[in-house]
Amino acid sequence: MEFIHVTSTNRQKTLLTAKPCVMALGFFDGVHLGHQQVLKEAKRVAEEQELPFVIMSFFPHPKEVLSNGKRIFPYLMPINDKRRIFEDLGADCFYLIQFDREFAGLSPREFVQTYLLHLGAKQVVAGFDFSYGYQGKGNLNTIKNDSDGKIEGINVDKIEWEGEKISSTTIRNMVLSGEMEKIPPYLGSDYQTEGRVMFRNNNTEIRLLRHYLLPAQGFYEVTLNHHQELLTQIASVYDGTITLFSSQGQGSPLNEWQTIRLSWKKRLSQRCEELRHVFLSSALVKS
């Protein structure tokens, strides 16, 4: 999959090399099952039309830009995770548009004419609630008019689980409240984070990489892949820090500064206070 980060400095060059395509549009934070339905529909249409399957997304989030950086958006995943999932879903090209105040000021028609048409979009697929242009005044019902009849907009209906719309906001709230076991039917998998291993005071701490979300304070069952072996660990989230210790009471099998991916299985709420006492006692004995 080709990846192109489109900025004000390379936009014109990018437009010159664009080819006709079917394009999926969205921010796609988390790439949950609702997003995946949009992407699969775009791929289906692309195969039907014998055109490349292209994805367009944006970064940073509009709320960060429009607040002049005063609001930090709680991302579920970084761009590299999106790239990996998009490639797995069969995308031919991923355009990541730099969202800045100039971009935010484009009218719906200017966005369609400047970006979608010039990047070759023939059909655009997005979720039912997707909007574009200044103050989100454009949507897939207006895209035909904004493109002078050259682009067909395809809406994908909302996807629900147990009567609730699957959304990035819902998943963020679950992470922030520690309800990790509820996430897979929405995300399509466990919530996963990556971080670097650090040894501090005889403890194994994980420093999260940027743009992952830290679960609520508590104890969790997590798994990690180490030398192709799946390990189950207990993770403590306390005072903004993730600390790992083996459920078997063994020492850490990890190396310092190693990057690992954690899959968050469930919160151990019933044993939380007991585990906290054991963990803190162990740390005091070792230090």
Image: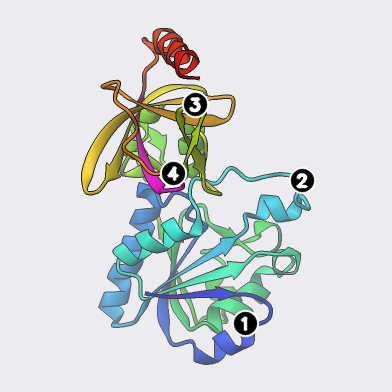
Which-is-in-front pick, marks 1 and 3? 3
- Residue depicted at 49% across the width and 87% down the height: 18
Regarding mark 2 in the picture, which secondary structure is present there? loop
Mark 2 packing: few (<14 Cα in 10 Å), some, or many (20+)?
A: few
In contact (CB < 8 Å): disc 2 and disc 1: no
Q: Amino acid at mark 2?
A: Lys
74 horizontally vs 166: left or right: right
In contact (CB < 8 Å): disc 4 and disc 2: no
- Residue depicted at 46% across the width and 42% down the height: 167
The residue under label 4 is 256
Q: Amino acid at mark 3?
A: Val
Which-is-in-front pick, marks 3 and 4? 4
The residue under label 2 is 70
- Answer with mark 2 or mark 1, whichever residue precedes in sequence: 1
Q: Give the spatial CA distance, label 4 vs label 2.
A: 34 Å
| Chain part drawn in magenta | 256-266
The residue under label 1 is 11
* Quarter of the figure with residue 276: top left
